[in-house]
Image (cartoon, rainbow, N blue to C red):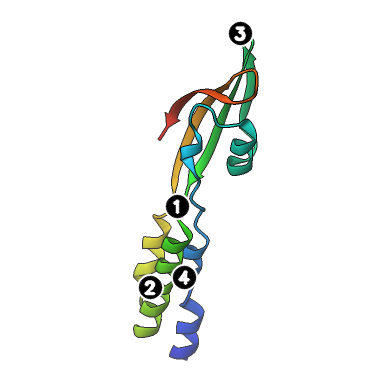
């Protein structure tokens, strides 16, 4: 019964660590970056409008973690689960729940060639 219970509990924190948001390349928010590169990395902007003949867009996203960091945390949680027969989940799951990434937002203005000519960090 204990083994069955520990197997059922095991891997919640492992799964949560592996499914955290991916790390985005915020270095693309610089003057000269083509709009197509921003779209490829961050998807469609949440706001897109024209002001004074210029195109403005706002990108909102959750900055996550590198693949190595996520894998390392998942391996740690898995090993801790095995060593403690699943008791680690009492600690590991709430701890992993606090790692959900940081919300970020940038306003971007483009020139006539759809290249970034101004960036304002709205939320870092």
Check disc 3 and report the residue beneath it.
52
19 and 67: which one is in front? 67
Q: What SS does tag 4 mark?
A: helix
Tell me how far mark 2 sits from mark 4, CA to CA: 8 Å
Where in the figure is residue 115, as x and y percent of width and height?
A: 59, 26
Tell me how far mark 4 sits from mark 3, CA to CA: 50 Å
48 and 24: which one is in front? 24
Q: Looking at the image, which residue is at 38% across and 62% down? A: 94
Tell me how far mark 1 sits from mark 2, CA to CA: 17 Å
Q: Which mark is residue 76?
A: 2
Mark 4 surroundings: few (<14), some (14-19) or many (≥20) residues within 10 A: many
- Nearest to the eye among marks 3 and 1: give it: 3
Give the mark nearest the N terminus, 1 or 2: 2
Mark 2 surroundings: few (<14), some (14-19) or many (≥20) residues within 10 A: some
Tell me how far mark 3 sits from mark 1, CA to CA: 38 Å
Residue 32 sits in quarter:
top right
């Amino acid at each position: 019964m204990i083994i069955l219970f520990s197997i059922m509990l095991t891997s919640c924190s492992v799964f949560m660590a592996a499914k955290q948001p991916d790390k985005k390349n915020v270095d693309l928010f610089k003057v000269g970056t083509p709009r197509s590169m921003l779209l490829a990395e961050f998807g469609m902007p949440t706001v897109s409008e024209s002001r004074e003949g210029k195109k403005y867009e706002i990108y909102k996203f959750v900055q996550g973690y590198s693949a190595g960091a996520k894998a390392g945390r998942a391996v740690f949680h898995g090993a801790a689960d095995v060593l403690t027969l699943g008791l680690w989940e009492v600690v590991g799951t709430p701890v992993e729940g606090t790692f959900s990434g940081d919300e970020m937002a940038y306003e971007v203005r483009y020139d006539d060639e759809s290249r970034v000519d101004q960036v304002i960090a709205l939320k870092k």
